[in-house]
Image (spheres, grey):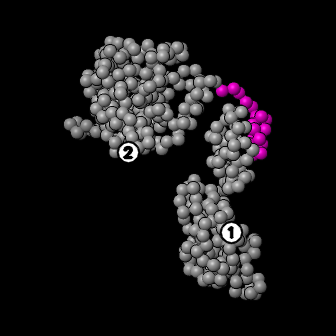
Amino acid sequence: MPQIPIIMPQLGESIAEANIVNFLVQPGDTVKADQDLIEVETDKATMTVASPCKGKIEKFTAQLNESYAVGATLGQIEATNEEAARLGLDVSPEKSADTQHISKSDAAGRDRSRVQPTIRGLPVPANAAGASYLSPRLKARMDELGLHAADLAGIAGSGAAGRVTVEDFEKFIANLEKQKISQASSMRVAVADAMRRSWTRPLATVGLPVPLEAVLKHRKASNPKPGPALYALRALAIALAENSAVAGRLVGNKIVHPSSIDVGFAVEAEDGVLVPVIRAADKKPLKELVVRYDELVELARQRKLPLDATGGSVATVTNFGTFGLVWATPIPLPEQTIVLGLGAGRRMPHWDEAKGQFIPVMEANLTLSFDHRVLDGGAAGRLLQRIAQLMSAPETL
């Protein structure tokens, strides 16, 4: 009788393999189509592999507590000719019982007739668990070279449970030395380290389109003229002063509120980003901040920021719209909970009830990326709505 393979299915968009944790049936058992046969565990959840047809379990080729890639054969089901035909297998009644088993060419044809997940196209090997565990010897070697666990992401470890061994590490280093290598600047290394530490937290982003007509009109009439990011910075400072908990840091089971609303803003410098800080930004009106803001922008570009204008900020504003970007998901600095982003302004159609027609309105996207341990989507959305409300009345800033 035909032998139908039990295949490890695609259990999720980003899942390349799963570990066998339990067999729900035994060889010789009769099963129904879509009956759960095997319990498997991924890095995200515990799931089951179902039977492709009804029949009798011939054997399991998979082993308990072993990991198998998507598309791997886990066992065989002895099925009837009718079931084989239902699955698209050509089993003619003229064939003898000895020749009714599925040949390799039949199986290949069946595989081609079904959608199969692509394994070889994965950006990293399916068994690349990364350096989830580092032995003392490996840690010492990495410290010697100034490397972090994040630098080993994507290495297919040969140790137990896919762990990266010292031998794997040395092969990785030897291969790197064959590639073109350039020295990273100290600023690039510092930015990389900050982002690595930031990413240890669960981060999320919400966004909101905001009309800029009022801001542009106010800026045109102002002297000196505030930069677009300064309007966002001032609005953020006022909103945080109204509820400082959203700018607080979670330490253990306590929310530590900021003692001062000191807000930074990102300035692109050579091979990196610097973040000058405006102290007590909620206490000074917009017109008093313009000169200091412009001064700090210039000092940052020269990499000559004074000590009193660096560090200790509770949030950052970044104007990614200067690069023509309309949407981005900035990452908060490690010591901060939130970062506010401002996209490029664009003319967009808005419905005018009075005129009964669409009119062009300049608008930009505001994004708020946040530490999800401190804020939920609702609180982040309300904060963003409040910032947008304040920016729509720039004369109050």
Expressed as whole percent of the image width and height from the top left, the position of residue 80 reads 64, 84
Q: CA distance from mark 2 to mark 1?
A: 42 Å
Q: In the displayed orientation, state which residue is furthest to the left.
A: 354
Q: Residue at x 56, y 68 (%)?
A: 48
Horizontal side of 344 relative to 103 (left or right) equals left
Query: Is label 1 in a helix, a strand or a loop?
Result: loop
The amino acid pointed to by label 1 is Ala
Say whether residue 88 is visible.
yes
Q: Which residue is mark 2?
A: 376
| Residues rendered magenta in the picture | 167-184
Task: Tally the numbered discs.
Answer: 2
Location of the C terminus by quadrant is: top left
Expressed as whole percent of the image width and height from the top left, the position of residue 337 reads 43, 36
Expressed as whole percent of the image width and height from the top left, the position of residue 134 reads 67, 45
Residue 63: image quadrant is: bottom right
162 vs 396: above or below: below
Q: Is residue 170 magenta?
A: yes
Q: Which residue is mark 1?
A: 62
253 vs 388: above or below: below
